[in-house]
Image (tube, grey):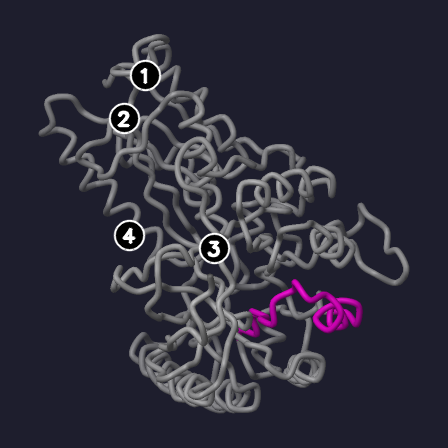
Amino acid sequence: RPPGPCPGSPATMPSVYIKTYGCQMNERDSEALAARLLARGYTLASSEADADVILLNTCSVRDHAEQTALNKMAALVAENRRRRQPALLGFLGCMAQRRGQALLDGLPDVDLVLGTHQLHRADVYLQELLAGQRERVVDVSKEPTAATVLREHLGSGNGPRAVTAYVSIMQGCNQRCAFCIVPTTRGPERSRSPDDILDECRQLVADGVKEITLLGQIVTSYGRGQIPRRDGKSAFVQLLEAIHALDGLERIRFTAPHPKGYGEDLIAAYGRLPKLAEHAHIPVQSGSDRVLRLMRRGYTRARFLELAHKLRAVQPRLGLTTDLIVGFPGETEADFEDTLSLCREACFDNAFIFKYSPREGTPAATMPGALPRPVIEERHARALALVDTLARRNYEALIGQQVQVLVEGPSKKNPARLMGRTRCGKIVVFEGPAALRGRLVDVWVRRAGSFTLYGEPVATPA
């Protein structure tokens, strides 16, 4: 085992590598954990080969995600046996919560299995494992409050502060859609206090953050049953207003909502809160009313399209994106065609399209009418092709237009160029000095690629 933290001996401080699978919630959890470990004297390894501790933060939404993490850990175990000084290995997150002790039974070389409710204890368990006080740890116990949410962020003292940041405002989900394992792995809804969230946002803005994205399994359910409506506004809209009042913050986004969470107060907020970005990612999952009922989604196709129409009436330049599931048990060709026609009517800017994956313990896993894999694959390809066509049309419509971009930094594919996002959520790449990072820049769009715009600044700011 690598040496544990040794006060006064920085050279012996362990290095940690965290690999993340899944959604933005997992990304945020990994960042917060990394920041907490840095604050306790650990260092972040640049690669697995250089790490004393390797943690896989896992996802359980689809079987493919679980299998990918399991295969990765098996490879790490094999590599560990060849290392002169083996790394401490651990599973975190949703798969850890769901499988618990079974992960250690299948991979005896793993040292730590930590569920979603106990991530805030990771530093304590790592210290004990590294010091030889424990041999192995499995903790998937549940805690009924939101006090377990990690609020640390990378930057401001442990590295450059990013221009954008995620803030988790709640954990868990009460929706219980037929296909989803999240209520099992994340537990019931637990909302943080507004003051706690505002303190975190205020500190981020003081550190130079210009855009904050609020996170929750169903983020629009924030404060439900805990914080009363005021002046006709839900707890979530009240929180948006409070964050909107922070000086120095330029933009607010949130994900992922549920169509049922879009009341008239939230729709109206898009027109009266200038910092609320004109982008809505609203998972529809299917365009068939019959399939939506089987999924237990609680809305109809007509309701979703009405919502899209109302949002665009308030913000005509709204960027609308969604999630879709193809191949749900019992989905007919007619049901799938309903999904394609909904995509055409809603004219999405993008869609994350998932092949249905049965999850043990969900109602859908035992539903009749499971589709053959080739049918699911073929429908997935058709849906992707349609969404690509719709997106290309929407992106090309912006050629010759002027858009406002928040510059996040160098482009990942071409570090010589800068990259940022429009208010409606589209990526823009352009040439300009590095000093523009963190600035709002007006850009002329000159061409459109696959889900990316390319342009040039209207004028180089002084």
Q: Which circle, 3 or 1, is nearer the viewer?
A: 3
Identify the secondary structure beneath mark 2. Answer: strand
In the picture of the structure, the residue carrying the numbered disc 3 is 438
Mark 4 → mark 1, Cα distance in angstroms:
27 Å
Residue 328 seen in this snapshot: no
Q: Which circle, 4 or 3, is nearer the viewer?
A: 3
Identify the secondary structure beneath mark 4. Answer: helix
Dot 4: within a 10 Å radius of its alpha carbon, few (fewer than 14), some, or many (20 or more) residues? Answer: some
Mark 3 → mark 1, Cα distance in angstroms:
39 Å
Query: Percent from the top left, x then y, of residue 96?
Result: 42, 39
Dot 3: within a 10 Å radius of its alpha carbon, few (fewer than 14), some, or many (20 or more) residues? Answer: many
Mark 2 → mark 4, Cα distance in angstroms:
19 Å
In the picture of the structure, the residue carrying the numbered disc 2 is 88
Say if 245 sits above or below 318 in the image: above
Amino acid carrying mark 3 in the image = Gly
In the picture of the structure, the residue carrying the numbered disc 4 is 68
Query: Can you tell which quarter of the image residue 359 is in?
Result: bottom left
In the picture of the structure, the residue carrying the numbered disc 1 is 130
* Residue situated in front as seen by the camera: 453 or 362: 453
Identify the secondary structure beneath mark 3. Answer: loop
Q: Which residues are magenta?
A: 263-285
Mark 4 → mark 3, Cα distance in angstroms:
35 Å
Tell which circle, 2 or 4, labels the residue nearer the N-terminal end: 4
